[in-house]
């Protein structure tokens, strides 16, 4: 593994060297300087080009050249919501929502809402680029699954130029960014058109095409992220404004919701305003989403219980510029049968200042997080307890987002100060790290589960003791069942062995009697 990483580092370095020597001198004016700077600094971006082109250097350099020229032509770095016509967002033809069964984000193209219009074709293509860039920056290049929902469509909706643009975005401009293309209920009249699309994809990407209907689409996307007309149960209805951002919401703290001052203000504004409540609850730039939602007084006292030296460490750690986060990628929850409903996120402040943090999730109704919004002292570690609420079970599609930003040394870290801080801190100063859920049948040592550090988590004594005793009794019961099964198999083996010996002895006896 170390050798592979070293070889990859050499390839990345050589790619940069050749690009700067062979392409940059003659074509610098065709590139956005910000993309050139990113290429020189972002190893992951360069590596994604190499992976998509199978480490063939010439093909990789050609793709980088085409991608950077395209990015400048479409002003990708400057695409904003306000730079595009509002009617394109309102149509609901393109948006991000939900996850497939492998945990990849879904990029929806509702074909029936697409209307061919040569006058708006460029803006529509920029809308595609906007969504892809919006997600690429937010999730650092994590791949997407594209869904072509072709229900209720016909020949009038065919726009091969636009489809080709979407395909080219993934094959030529956004390397290693596509997992699969799920095509739902393609009309038979479009078979000829999609034969052309297959030609655009090339041999490597053809295997990514998945033609589905209502009976088999759930092989790739679970029902919770499929609308009813596709056989699912997702009640999501696209609307604009605000911009759809259904990913991360602030969960309730473990002790239940206690509204902050800003939340009370928001409620008063909702009552006195004509805006619909949904607009306020979904818009990330408004007060409610920027406030320190649902923080309890007990979260403030958690800061005094930080244990810099004795905090439990996971086997994997994400080393960010402000916080080290353990585990690095996955929170391991048990299935309903195994019953493991709690685990830990350990944050370690590696700066010389106080770091404010908050935890958000894609499924706020499922989880309780304590503390969900607080701060961490310089050099200290803090345990965050993530627990499943009620009868909910963890899902592979569930995600957690840890947001962190450095505060001034002199700044206070109480509820009002944190509320104001998150309102004012620039987006560029916020560190973000995403964690996904992993459901296991039994607890794994690589995960920082709740039971591994039960005695290090501040909780109510009676509840904690009861939980520990119950957990120990469950473990004891499982061990006893395993021992009983082992003894039963041992006894069965002994009986079978004796029976075999008896049969063999009887056979010898019969043979002896026949001879005599």
Image (cartoon, rainbow, N blue to C red):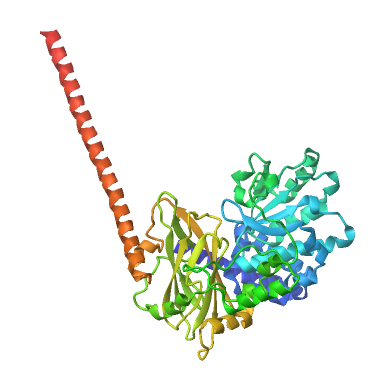
Residue farthest left in this picture: 516
- The quarter in which the C terminus is drawn is top left
Question: Is residue 156 shown above or below 138?
Answer: above
Left or right: where does residue 106 sit relative to residue 489?
right
Q: Quadrant of residue 237?
A: bottom right
Question: Is residue 186 shown above or below 504?
Answer: below
Q: Quadrant of residue 165?
A: bottom right
Residue 265: x %, y % from top left: 64, 78
Residue 125 shows in this picture: no
Question: Is residue 498 shown above or below 514?
Answer: below
Give whichever of 405, 193 is nearer the camera.
Answer: 405
Residue at position x 48%, y 54% in the image = 391
Residue 106: x %, y % from top left: 65, 55
Residue 20: x %, y % from top left: 67, 73
Give whichever of 421, 57 is nearer the camera.
Answer: 421
Residue 87: x %, y % from top left: 82, 63
Residue at position x 38%, y 78% in the image = 305
């Amino acid at each position: 593994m170390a050798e592979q990483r070293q070889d990859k580092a050499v390839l990345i370095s050589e790619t940069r060297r050749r690009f700067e020597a062979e392409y940059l001198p003659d074509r610098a004016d065709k590139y956005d300087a910000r993309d050139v700077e990113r290429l020189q600094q972002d190893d992951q971006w360069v590596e994604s080009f190499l992976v998509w082109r199978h480490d063939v250097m010439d093909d990789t350099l050609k793709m980088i050249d085409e991608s950077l020229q395209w990015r400048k032509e479409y002003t990708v770095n400057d695409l904003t919501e306000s730079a595009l016509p509002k009617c394109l967002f309102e149509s609901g033809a393109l948006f991000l929502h939900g996850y497939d069964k492998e945990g990849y984000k879904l990029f929806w193209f509702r074909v029936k809402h697409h209307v061919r219009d040569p006058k708006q074709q460029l803006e529509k293509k920029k809308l595609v680029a906007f969504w892809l860039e919006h997600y690429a920056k937010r999730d650092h290049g994590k791949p997407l699954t594209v869904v072509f929902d072709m229900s209720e469509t016909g020949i009038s909706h065919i726009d091969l130029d636009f489809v080709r643009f979407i395909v080219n975005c993934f094959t030529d401009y956004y390397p290693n960014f596509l997992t699969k293309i799920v095509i739902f209920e393609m009309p038979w009249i479009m078979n000829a058109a999609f034969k052309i699309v297959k030609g655009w994809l090339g041999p490597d990407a053809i295997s990514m095409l998945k033609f589905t209907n209502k009976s088999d689409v759930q092989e790739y996307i679970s029902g919770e992220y499929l609308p009813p007309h596709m056989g699912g149960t997702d009640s999501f209805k696209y609307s604009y404004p605000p911009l759809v951002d259904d990913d991360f919401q602030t969960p309730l703290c473990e002790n239940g919701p206690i509204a902050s001052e800003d939340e009370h203000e928001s409620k008063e504004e909702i009552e006195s305003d004509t805006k619909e409540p949904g607009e306020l609850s979904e818009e990330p730039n408004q007060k409610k989403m920027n406030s320190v939602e649902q923080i309890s007084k007990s979260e403030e006292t958690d800061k005094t219980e930080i244990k810099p030296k004795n905090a439990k460490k996971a086997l994997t750690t994400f080393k960010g510029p402000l916080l080290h986060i353990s585990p690095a990628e996955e929170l391991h929850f048990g299935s309903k049968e195994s019953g493991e409903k709690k685990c830990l996120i350990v944050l370690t402040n590696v700066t010389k200042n106080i770091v404010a943090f908050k935890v958000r999730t894609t499924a706020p109704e499922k989880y309780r997080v304590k503390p969900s919004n607080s701060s961490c002292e310089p050099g200290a570690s803090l345990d965050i307890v993530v627990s499943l609420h009620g009868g909910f079970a963890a899902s592979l599609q569930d995600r957690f987002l840890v947001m962190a930003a450095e505060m001034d040394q002199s700044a206070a870290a109480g509820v009002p100060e944190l509320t104001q801080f998150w309102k004012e801190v620039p987006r560029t100063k916020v560190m973000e790290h995403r964690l996904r859920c992993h459901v296991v049948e039994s607890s794994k040592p690589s995960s920082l589960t709740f039971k591994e550090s039960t005695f290090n988590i501040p909780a109510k004594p009676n509840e904690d003791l009861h939980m520990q005793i119950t957990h120990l009794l469950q473990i004891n019961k499982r061990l006893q069942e395993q021992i009983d099964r082992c003894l039963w198999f041992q006894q069965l083996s002994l009986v079978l062995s004796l029976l075999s010996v008896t049969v063999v002895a009887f056979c010898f006896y019969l043979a002896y009697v026949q001879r005599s």
